Image (cartoon, grey):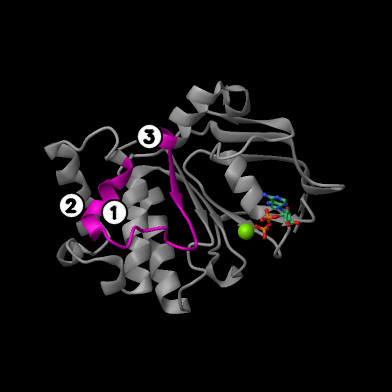
Amino acid sequence: MTATSSKPAIEIVDLTKEFTIGPTTVRALRGVSTTITSGSFQFVLGPSGSGKTTLLYLLGALDRPSGGSIIVDGRAINELSQDDQDYFRRHEVGFVFQSFNLLGNLTALENVLAPFFPVGVSGELRKRATDLLDHVGLANRQQHRPRELSGGEQQRVAIARALLKQPKLVLADEPTGELDHQTGAEVMGYLRGLREEMGTTVVVVTHDESYIDPGDQTLRLRDGLIVTD
Ligand SMILES: Nc1ncnc2c1ncn2[C@@H]1O[C@H](COP(=O)(O)OP(=O)(O)O)[C@@H](O)[C@H]1O
Ligand SMILES: [Mg+2]
C-alpha cells in the first residue's frame, strides 16, 4: 500500500488556458491557484462552461496550459518534453470519463487491457486485470461486451482500466453523468475505495453536489476562476 504523505500532490499556480478560434478568444481558465493534497478525494464543481474539463485535461497533460504551472510531486508537468508528458499521461494517470470510451468489439477484460496492447500483455498483467474486474464486482462479466453490460458496469470497467496502470492520480470527468443516481453513487463509492485502499489521489468533476461527503475537498469554478464557498 502506498503511504499517504502530507506533501501536496499537485500544486496549481496561476493556471490559464485560452482557446482562440478565428477572431474569438475564450479564456477557459483565468488564473487558477490551488493545492490538491496527496491521497485526497477532490471534487471540482461548477456550472457548465466554467472550465472543469479544461482543468482536468491540463492536470492529465492531455493539453498544455497557456500560462502558469502544474507541479506534480515536484515536477512541473507543463514544462516536460512531449515524450515525458506522453509517459506521464500513459503511465501515471488514470482517466475515467463521462462516456465510458469502451471499445464495443472488445470484452470487458480486453477493454481493461487495451491500453497495454501496444506494449504487450504479460500473463501477470492479465491476472491483475482479472483481479481488478473482480475488485469492482465484475468477476463474472469479464467476457461480456459493453452492450451486454449496464451503464454502471461499463463505468466500472473504465475504472478497472484506469487502475491497471496503478496510477497515483485518477482524473474522473463527470463519471456519473450518464448514470441514474443510485448507480452513480455506486460508481462514486468505487472511486472512494481507491483512495482509501491504495492512497490514490482522486479528482472528480461533477455538477451533482449530492455526491459530496463531509470531509471531501471541494474546489468550485465559475468563469474560469475559483470561487470560495
Ligand atoms: N477545445 C476547445 N476549443 C475552444 N473552446 C473550448 C475548448 N474546450 C473548452 N472550450 C471553452 O472553454 C470554456 C470552458 O469549457 P470546459 O472546460 O469544457 O467547461 P466545463 O467542463 O466546466 O463545462 C467553455 O466556454 C468552452 O466552450
Ligand atoms: Mg466538462
Q: Residue at coordinates 45% horizontally, 48% vertically from top-left?
A: 95
Tell me what residue is drawn at x 33 percent, y 39 percent: 166
143 vs 48, nearest the viewer: 143
Q: Secondary structure at mark 2?
A: helix
Q: Is residue 130 magenta?
A: no
First of labels 1, 3 by sequence position: 3
Residue 99 on the magenta span: yes
Q: Secondary structure at mark 3?
A: loop
Extent of the magenta region: 90-115
Horizontal and vertical percent for residue 159? Answer: 36, 55
Q: Earlier in the sequence, mark 2 or mark 1?
A: 1
Disc 2 marks a residue whose amino acid type is Thr
- Please report contact status of discs 2 and 3: CB closer than 8 Å, yes or no: no
Furthest toward the front, the residue is 22
* Label located before the other in sequence (2 or 3): 3
Instruction: Check whether the beta carbons of the residues at disc 2 and disc 1 lie within 8 A of each other.
Output: no
Residue indicated by mark 2: 130
Name the residue tied to disc 3: 3
10 Å crowding of disc 3: few (<14), some (14-19), many (20+): few
